[in-house]
Image (cartoon, rainbow, N blue to C red):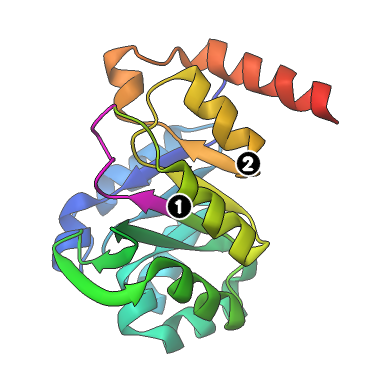
Amino acid sequence: MGAPRLHVVDLDGAATGEMHNLSIINDIARAMLIPVQVGGGIRNIGTIELLLKAGIERVILGTAAVENPALIADACHRFNDAIIVGIDARGGYVATRGWLTNTEQTAVGLAKAMALVGVKRFIYTDITRDGTLTEPNIPAISEMIESLGLPVIAAGGISSLIHLKIISKIGAEGAIVGKALYTGDINLKQAIAEISQAEDSNK
């Protein structure tokens, strides 16, 4: 349908700290002709290497960014652009371990700290919006983009073409669409065509 990239999360892994669906993820990577990015339960260099060798293009680290910043610095040094930090926030504060653990770390504060150790790309997810088909948290996404000056991919609550156009307009590098594809609220082929057209006309 024209998707430029596939976003996969091992939810079991995110909660337990160890990937549970690695064989399925490997099968997906082999089957795809487009780049695949993966997150969920990735907490060590060995797992990152395993995924990259399996053909995964980008690896997303979330909980590790809070609990083990040294790992992020090491991963960025070794794998550069292949590393993304995923920041999952509830009320502006980061949640970890599959959203089960709340922290006192602000989303923007964590992102800035991660940028200092070499992270070049972020995914920002508003947990309270994710899977709700309501609307994305535009002010929070905008604040993240403006604070960092680095590529930010938006996620959570995206359920219409209008949402995608707004996210594009405020400067997000991309958007992750999940439930809205399953429900048919967003027609992926149409959305990609219209966003591309809008971006071309703004150049």
Residue numbers of the magenta segment: 124-133
Residue 34 image label: none
Instruction: Please check the rendered image and state whether residue 125 is part of the magenta-colored stretch, yes or no.
Output: yes
Numbered disc 1: secondary structure: helix
x then y, percent, for residue 200: 80, 24
Whether pointer 2 and pointer 1 mark residues with C-beta atoms closer than 8 Å, the reply is: no
- Judged left or right of residue 22, residue 200 is right
Name the residue: 35% across, 85% down: 68
Numbered disc 2: secondary structure: loop
Residue 49 visible in the shown view: yes
Q: In this view, does 127 lie above or below 102?
A: above
Residue furthest bottom as drawn: 70
**Quadrant location of residue 186?**
top left
Name the residue: 48% across, 27% down: 163
Name the residue: 52% across, 84% down: 74
The kind of residue tagged 2 is Ile
**Quadrant location of residue 145?**
bottom right
Residue under label 1, please give it.
140
Query: 193 or 83: which is nearer to us?
Result: 193
Query: 203 or 76: which is nearer to us?
Result: 203
- Quadrant that contains the C terminus: top right
Q: In this view, does 8 lie above or below 17?
A: above
Residue 170 image label: 2
Name the residue: 51% across, 80% down: 113
Q: What secondary structure is the magenta-colored segment mainly?
A: loop
* Distance between the alpha carbons at the discs numbered 2 and 1: 11 Å
Query: 147 or 63: which is nearer to us?
Result: 147
x then y, percent, for residue 134: 30, 28
Residue 1 visible in the shown view: no
**Quadrant location of residue 79?**
bottom right
> Within 10 Å of the Cα at label 1, are there few (<14), some (14-19), or many (20+) other Cα atoms?
some
The kind of residue tagged 1 is Ala
